[in-house]
Amino acid sequence: MELLEGEEQQPIVFERLLEEWHRIADAYKMENKINLFALMTARPPKLIGKNLIEMTVENTVQEDLLLVAKPDIVNALRSSLNNYAIDIKSVMATNDTARKPYTAQEKYQAMIAKNPLLDEFRRIFNLGLE
C-alpha cells in the first residue's frame, strides 16, 4: 500500500495526535484485530521532532505487526492531522529485568560474582556442588 503524499504540513498537537491514535486503535478493535489494538494502546506514542512518531515494541513479532499496519496508520494520521510528512518508527523496548538464578550452579555463579573469594575457598577446602 502506498503512503498518501501532499504538500500540507500543519504542526502536530500531541493531544490531537493521541485522539487520532486511539480512534485508529478503536477501529482495529472493532475489526477484531486485537493484536494491533493491544500494540497501539500498550504504550503511548512519542512525538520526535515535528513529524516522526516513535512507537515502542516489545519484540520482533510486534515490530513485524507494526510494519504491516504502518501504511494504514500513517495514511490515517496524515489525512486526519493534515500533515503529509508524518512517519512512524519502531523502537525495541529494553528489558532490564535480570533472570533469577534457579539451579545450584547458577546460584553459585551469582554468589561468585558478588564475592570472588568464595571460589578460592571452594578450591582450598576441596568442596563441590550438589
Image (cartoon, rainbow, N blue to C red):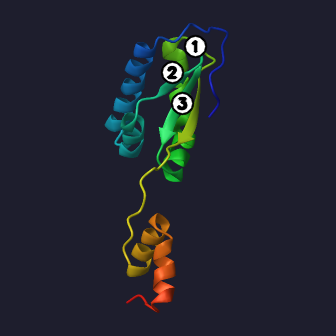
Within-10-Å neighbours for mark 2: few <14, some 14–19, many 20+ = some
Front disc: 3 or 2: 3
Picture coordinates of residue 37, whole percent (x, y): 37, 38
Q: Which residue is rendered at x = 63% and y = 18% of the image?
A: 85
Quadrant location of residue 128?
bottom left
The answer to whether marks 1 and 3 mark residues whose Cβ atoms lie closer than 8 Å is no
| Cα distance in 3D space between marks 3 and 2 | 14 Å
31 shown above or below 96 = above
Quadrant location of residue 43?
top left
The amino acid at mark 2 is Leu
Identify which residue, 76 or 49, lies in the foreground: 49
Within-10-Å neighbours for mark 3: few <14, some 14–19, many 20+ = some
The amino acid at mark 3 is Glu
Picture coordinates of residue 46, whole percent (x, y): 49, 26
Quadrant the C terminus occupies: bottom left
Where is mark 1, residue-wise?
83
2 shown above or below 95 = above
Picture coordinates of residue 29, whole percent (x, y): 33, 37
Q: Which residue is rendered at x = 42% and y = 40% of the image?
A: 39
Quadrant the N terminus occupies: top right
Q: Secondary structure at mark 1?
A: loop
| Cα distance in 3D space between marks 1 and 3 | 16 Å
Where is mark 3, residue-wise?
54
